[in-house]
């Protein structure tokens, strides 16, 4: 995530298909990062562990979206060497503070020492480097996905252990009925970006189309998602069938 912190926006997509080949093709296609989606796909912890390795070996950053905000898989995912975690459907600063504290090493936070795990290169990484990577380079991003929560972005951006905020436009549409291109939604998107930049935090958003993704990168968003592996394959397959008949 150092490239994102340097000011260059990164382009990513969601991974829902539990296959190494898919991750490999996304890397060859040119994506900077992927988010392994444990919330809206059947990805289990053991397969996510393997996909983190595959993603990083292909030169992309490996982020993981947690299945909920209870935090049970936080420790094993960080021990697996994930570059960061996204926490979905956050509506409370107390919940956000509690779960991100579990991603920071004790005594400042609550993360345990897993130096003999993959994250510590099986104890071959110097301990200071392991601790620094865990606390300073690991992305701890919360997803704000309803109108009231997004309007309170500044409160979430001020939380000590939160270092990234993600705009969830899909669930925002469900709760508000307002599409992503509505002027008031775009104004809110801009407000979130300003708040994260003012707080020195990373910003994230998911786009529905390449045109939208390009516009969010131009705005200055740190991490921009577009589509997902399953939809990319499904739409390409459907178009191939349509064009062949």
Image: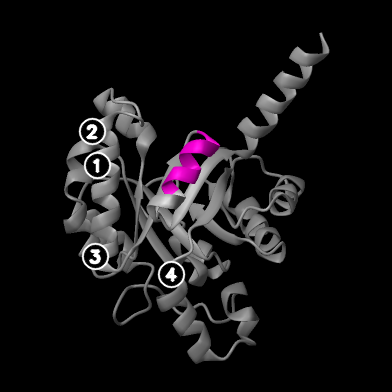
Evaluate if marks 2 and 1 touch, with contact meaning CB atoms under 8 Å apart: yes
Label 1: few (<14), some (14–19) or many (≥20) C-alpha neighbours in 10 Å: some
In what element is the residue under mark 2? helix
Q: Quadrant of residue 241?
A: top right
First reached walking from the N terminus: tag 4 or tag 3: 4
103 relative to 177, above or below? below
Say left or right for 45 vs 8.
Answer: right
Q: How would you classify the magenta stretch by its main secondary structure?
A: helix
Coordinates of residue 183 in the picture (x, y in percent): 27, 31
First reached walking from the N terminus: tag 2 or tag 3: 2
Tell me, what colour scheme is on the image? one colour
135 or 6, nearer to the observer: 6
Question: In the rendered view of the protein, which quadrant contains the C terminus?
Answer: top right
Q: CA distance from mark 2 to mark 4?
A: 28 Å
Where does label 2 land, which residue?
184
In what element is the residue under mark 3? helix
Q: Quadrant of residue 163?
A: bottom left
Where does label 3 land, which residue?
198
197 relative to 181, above or below? below
Measuring 72% from the left and 20% from the top, which residue is drawn there?
239
Label 2: few (<14), some (14–19) or many (≥20) C-alpha neighbours in 10 Å: few
Whether residue 231 is visible, yes or no, is yes
Where does label 4 land, which residue?
5
Q: CA distance from mark 2 to mark 3?
A: 21 Å
Where does label 1 land, which residue?
188
Coordinates of residue 67 in the picture (x, y in percent): 44, 45
Label 3: few (<14), some (14–19) or many (≥20) C-alpha neighbours in 10 Å: few
- Does the segment drawn in magenta span residue 37? no
In what element is the residue under mark 4? helix
Magenta segment boundaries in residue numbering? 209-216
């Amino acid at each position: 995530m150092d490239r994102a912190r340097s000011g260059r926006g990164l382009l990513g997509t969601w991974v829902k298909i539990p296959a190494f080949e898919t991750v490999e093709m996304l890397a060859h296609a040119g994506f900077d990062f992927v988010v392994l989606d444990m919330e809206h796909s059947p990805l289990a912890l053991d397969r996510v562990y393997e996909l983190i390795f595959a993603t990083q070996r292909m030169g992309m950053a490996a982020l993981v979206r947690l299945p909920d905000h209870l935090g049970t898989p936080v420790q094993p995912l960080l021990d697996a060497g994930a570059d960061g975690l996204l926490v979905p459907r956050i509506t409370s600063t107390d919940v956000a503070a509690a779960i991100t504290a579990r991603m920071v090493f004790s005594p400042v936070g609550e993360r345990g020492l897993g130096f003999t795990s993959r994250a510590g290169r099986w104890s071959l990484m110097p301990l200071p480097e392991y601790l620094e990577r865990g606390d300073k380079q690991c992305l701890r991003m919360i997803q704000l996905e309803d109108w009231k929560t997004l309007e309170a972005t500044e409160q979430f951006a001020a939380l000590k252990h939160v270092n990234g905020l993600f705009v969830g436009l899909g669930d925002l549409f469900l709760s508000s009925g307002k599409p992503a291109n509505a002027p008031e939604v775009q104004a809110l998107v801009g407000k979130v970006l300003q708040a994260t930049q003012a707080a020195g935090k990373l910003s994230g958003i998911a786009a529905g189309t390449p045109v939208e993704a390009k516009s969010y990168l131009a705005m200055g968003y740190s991490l921009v998602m577009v589509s997902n592996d399953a939809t990319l394959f499904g739409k390409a397959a459907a178009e191939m069938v349509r064009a062949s008949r």
